[in-house]
Image: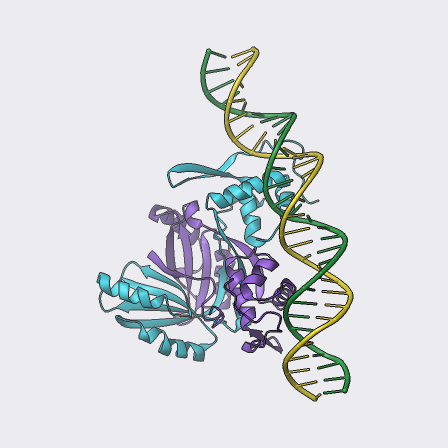
Chain colours: A cyan, B purple, C green, D yellow
DNA sequence: CCAGGATGCGTGTCGGTGTGCCCAAGGAGA
DNA sequence: TCTCCTTGGGCACACCGACACGCATCCTGG
């Protein structure tokens, strides 16, 4: 009963909060859509009625909006978040890699192999010195030595590898809070 | 019908595949547990029967295992993955930040403010030169200029800010494939 | 030989989901 | 100003499915 909105009334506050030009049509999300997205980011398995109570809608209206959000591609998937620390993966390493050559063939060859590395979770092609930055998850420093030997050093066309260990993770968000805007009020 | 396991038999393949020392008790996950986790990483809203068919279990056994995985903390949450490109956030920037001082008070002050930055999705305290690395999401380069001005430049105790733009994201995994091991066979 | 653990089956109840229908508000046009 | 149309919301209902329980069975280890 923490919702103190105006029930029974068709919600005159449905003003467009955010508008984007996605594809070739202009879409708009009001604050209720943002509230739905914010809630689903936390509880992906919430039922329609449960979400409806939190947002301040009926289950019917919520089901329609949720389906629209899915069809329009705002919601890509529903996925379980695993606690990687439970698997012993407590060490995050940022790896900077410079290639011997920036030729298209060298980039292709490198990328074709880096996607196979089992410990790499992210890989960016960076501007500037035309190198890559990887985020690698390891059990500990000794385990990273193994990864460096069995995965990273086998990548083709690599000229230089520079590793930095993360001592602590201060922020870890899947979605920047700027997306939800004023929806959380 | 892609499952060709031994039905009706209590599954003699339940050998421990992975074992961890989580907390103060030793837990073990067999390949069916890993298959459940791998599937839930993709379809968090899958029903018990749907998962049971894919893994090769009855819905009863699967429900028990899933609840165990949740209670033991392997599954942290079920969350919807948003397509940030639909929100116009197509530019990823890696920001390296060095502080004026590495004193405890300076670190605390910086971290207390960086968690409030709406465009920052990740922030690591790094080893080496004792600086931070942020991952920032922006709409475009002009938008990053605004973020730099309104969010980053207001962070306390900052001596140097160095930004690198990501031209392309080659790998983006929530979970390293090393976790699932041989479960996907 | 006997617990202990894990699986599969069956059943019942509860809840979610989807549909149809009506209503309210706002905008466009005559 | 009046009317029509569109959009979005709420209510009621019915159906299908998920979920949780109890019980029998089978393997394993002591």
The N terminus of chain A - image quarter: top right
Residue B131 showing in the rendered view: yes
Q: Residue at x 23, y 63 (%)?
A: A105
User: Which sits in the foreground, A48 or B98?
Assistant: A48
Determine the residue positioned at 35% across, 64% down.
A133
Image location of residue B7, percent across then percent down:
59, 69
Q: Nearer the viewer, residue A105 or B118?
A: A105
Quadrant location of the C terminus of chain A in the rendered image: top right
| Residue A102 shows up from this direction | no
Q: Position of residue B62 (x, y in %)?
A: 62, 65
- Total count of labels: 0
For residue A129, above or below residue A33: below
Q: Residue B123's x, y, as percent?
A: 46, 61
Q: Nearer the viewer, residue B106 or B171?
A: B171
Q: Nearer the viewer, residue B135 or B23?
A: B23
Left or right: A33 in relation to B96 = right
B152 relative to A153 in the view: left or right: right
In the picture shown, does residue B16 fall above or below A102?
Answer: below
- Where does the image place residue B69, in percent across and percent down from the top left? 60, 67
Q: Is residue B96 left or right of residue B114?
A: left
B94, above or below D2, in the image:
below
């Amino acid at each position: 009963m923490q919702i103190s909105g105006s029930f029974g009334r068709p919600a005159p506050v449905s003003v467009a909060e955010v508008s984007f030009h996605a594809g070739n049509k202009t879409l708009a999300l009001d604050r209720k859509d943002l509230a739905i997205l914010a809630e689903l980011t936390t509880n992906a398995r919430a039922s329609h009625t449960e979400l409806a109570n939190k947002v301040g809608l009926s289950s019917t209206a919520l089901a329609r909006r949720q389906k629209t959000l899915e069809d329009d591609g705002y919601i890509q998937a529903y996925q379980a978040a695993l606690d990687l620390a439970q698997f012993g993966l407590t060490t995050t390493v940022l790896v900077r890699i410079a290639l011997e050559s920036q030729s298209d063939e060298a980039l292709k060859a490198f990328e074709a192999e880096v996607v196979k590395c089992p410990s790499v979770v992210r890989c960016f092609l960076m501007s500037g010195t035309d190198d890559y930055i990887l985020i690698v998850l390891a059990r500990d420093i000794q385990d990273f030595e193994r990864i460096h030997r069995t995965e990273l050093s086998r990548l083709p066309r690599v000229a230089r590898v520079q590793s930095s260990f993360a001592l602590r993770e201060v922020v870890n968000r899947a979605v920047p809070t700027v997306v939800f805007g004023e929806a959380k009020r």
